[in-house]
Amino acid sequence: MATVYLITGVGALATYFSNDFYIFLVTRFIQGGALLSICNIPFVLALEYMPAKKRMFMLGAFRFVYPLVGAAMPWVAYALGHWRLLNAVIMLPCVVGVIVSPFMPESTRWLLSKGRTDKAKKVLLRISRVNGMHVQRNALDSLQAPEKGDNATASTAAIFKYPSLRRSFVITLFLRLLQCLSHQAGQLYAAAATDDPFVMTSITNVVDVLGIWLAVPMGDKCGRRFTMALTCALAGLCYLVGAGLYTNSVAIFASLMVGRAVQTIAYNVACMHAAEIYPTEIRTQGLSIRHAFGSLGKFLSSNVVQLVSILMVLSG
């Protein structure tokens, strides 16, 4: 994790000093390549130590950061007034991440897979002390390193050997692509359709905060799948209503913002659902692939938004 933060920070610093367009592309590629790991590794590590009944709460704590920073960043960029300075500011959290990462407990699952059983026991004992729980050292004697054969199929390729798991994995990838495409396209369109994109970007991120806040109790009380299905249907309905309102700008705005909020609920509950159904051995790899499909959806979102201009030209 510290290495990922370091790579991202170096990429941001190199971008700051880049004077050539192709060097700029390379440095941005480095940042983009490390970005998924920044999102993924801390989440999986926290999930490993979190009891099932607290997982949605943990997800909410993780996801709250994104819209809060997203709401503030337009004004940070406006205050700085230069993209190079903005990249320098982005580097500062990466420096903090490098410093803080060594103080976090290592993954016991990873330690056991590497045969470092004693280290895994020390980590668990340390966590129990921090949590105010007394655990006898001999209570952890049952921890054993897995057999060599157990790791032979610890790859995402093993998913496709099991029909049910294969189906679930493919569906989660497809849903991630669609959710990221529509979620990002909604934000891009909202910013492009107004005369003040900074204000609109902040508003959509504040709406995301509301959606994340509602996702935690809904995901726990109603279940993951039902919550995803219900909120996706409601979001689609709100967007259709917004598309059908031609003159009332206030009603259009309200409909789109409600749709954004319930879509954010589906977006966040889906993140937890995927992490829970992926097998422990390939959870990190599976979530990384899922995030990659999400990045593809975000890449396509700008093209979807551009279709609005093309359709307006064709319609005269």
Image (cartoon, rainbow, N blue to C red):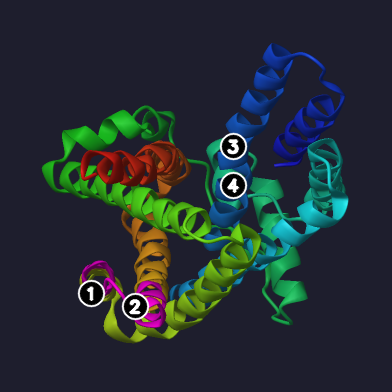
Q: Which residue is mark 4?
A: 41
Residue at 29% x, 46% y is 312
Query: Is 164 inside the magenta-drawn segment?
Result: no
Q: Position of residue 60 (x, y in %)?
A: 54, 72
Q: Which residues are magenta?
A: 238-256
Mark 2, secondary structure of its residue:
helix
One can see residue 139 in this view: no
Q: Position of residue 92 (x, y in %)?
A: 86, 47
> Marks 4 and 3: in contact by CB < 8 Å?
no
Query: Is 244 inside the magenta-drawn segment?
Result: yes
**Residue 153 falls in which quadrant of the image?**
top left
Q: Amino acid at mark 3?
A: Gly
Q: Which residue is mark 2?
A: 255
Q: Position of residue 89 (x, y in %)?
A: 85, 47
> Marks 2 and 1: in contact by CB < 8 Å?
yes
Question: Residue 241's mark?
Answer: 1
Question: Residue 115's mark?
Answer: 3
> Marks 1 and 4: in contact by CB < 8 Å?
no
